[in-house]
Amino acid sequence: MLPSVETDEEWDEIVPDENVMRPGVEHLCGRLGLAGAPLVRFTEGSQPVYAVGEEHVLKLFPGAAAEDGITEGRVLTFLQDRLPVPTPQVRSFGPYEAGWQYVLMSRLPGEGLAAAWPRLPQDARERLVTEAGEALAALHALDPSPLAGLLGPGDWEAFLARQRAGAVEQQRGRGLPPGWLEQIPDFLAGVPLAAPARPALLHTEFMSQHLMVAPDASRLTGLFDFEPAMIGDPAYDFVAVGLFVTRGDTGLLGRFTKAYGRTFEPRELLAHTLLHVYSNLPWYLRELPTPAEPTLDALAESWFGTS
């Protein structure tokens, strides 16, 4: 019922079109025993995702992203009931038709933390940041070896070397001004990143957009979106923490790292920011506090310092 999507052009034509997508989703729901359940498509996210009634979420992955669907299903299955913050319970996952993959999962209660954050008082923010730090520590404490054959990048040092080689061009492509671009090679050369002594299961996008909070902000009620999961250096997950959870608030990052049980040098975390697969420094510069000086060293302290 869903057409093949293997190219960017097919993606742009088919995936946003509900006249094409909905009949296929309804057909798949029928196969899964959910025929007739109300369907509401979420507006966020890179993949098509639907609320199916009040209890389920159906996430679809076209052929161009089929491996991400396998990753999501396997990682969520591995994580069931293993973290202090709930993750979606997998009901079913696998292939559909024409190269598509799906994951049917439980729907997490509550509201997205990113949406709730602006109206939360400081004590609630501090409490939730502490919970988030504990949750990330629990994730990183798990033995990721059962997922080693599934998750990349395999050789962490080789991955960092590839990212380092393309770091300037990645930021140039994002529109970073020359004054910042010219600092990147020397900055990265001055921050040696050794292979982690104990590789961890990484979410890679541990951000407020992927955390749920109770309506009264009393607790976190969920962590989701594990399709980009990797195995590697725990510091890599702190990129999204500093940029999208604590957002340059050094006091909140200090609280997070205390709950996590470990701190990282600000320059190390900015280096991982520049090497992150999805790094977009011009966007971060628009969204986060301006450093005292237009240097990467000052930027590291501004976004990843703790107090």
Image (spheres, rainbow, N blue to C red):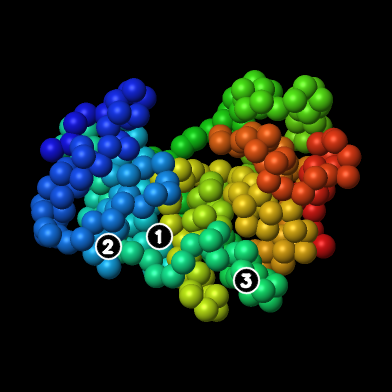
Image location of residue 50, percent across then percent down: 29, 53
Whether residue 290 can be seen here: yes
> Residue placed at 85% from the left, 35% from the top?
295
Dot in front, 3 or 1 = 3
The label on residue 56 is 2
SS at mark 3 in the image: loop
Q: Quadrant of the C terminus?
A: bottom right
SS at mark 1 in the image: helix
Q: Are marks 3 and 2 in contact (CB under 8 Å)?
A: no
Q: Amino acid at mark 3?
A: Leu
Q: Residue furthest right?
A: 293
Q: CA distance from mark 3 to mark 2?
A: 28 Å
The label on residue 53 is none
The label on residue 120 is 3
User: Which of the 4 image quarters holds residue 128?
Assistant: bottom right
> Residue placed at 81% from the left, 25% from the top?
179
- Residue in front for this viewpoint, 112 or 307: 112
Image location of residue 147, percent across then percent down: 40, 47
- Tag 1: Cα neighbours inside 10 Å, few (<14), some, or many (≥20)? some
Q: Which residue is labeled 1 in the image?
A: 79
Q: Amino acid at mark 2?
A: His
Q: Amino acid at mark 1?
A: Leu
Say left or right for 290 vs 105. Answer: right
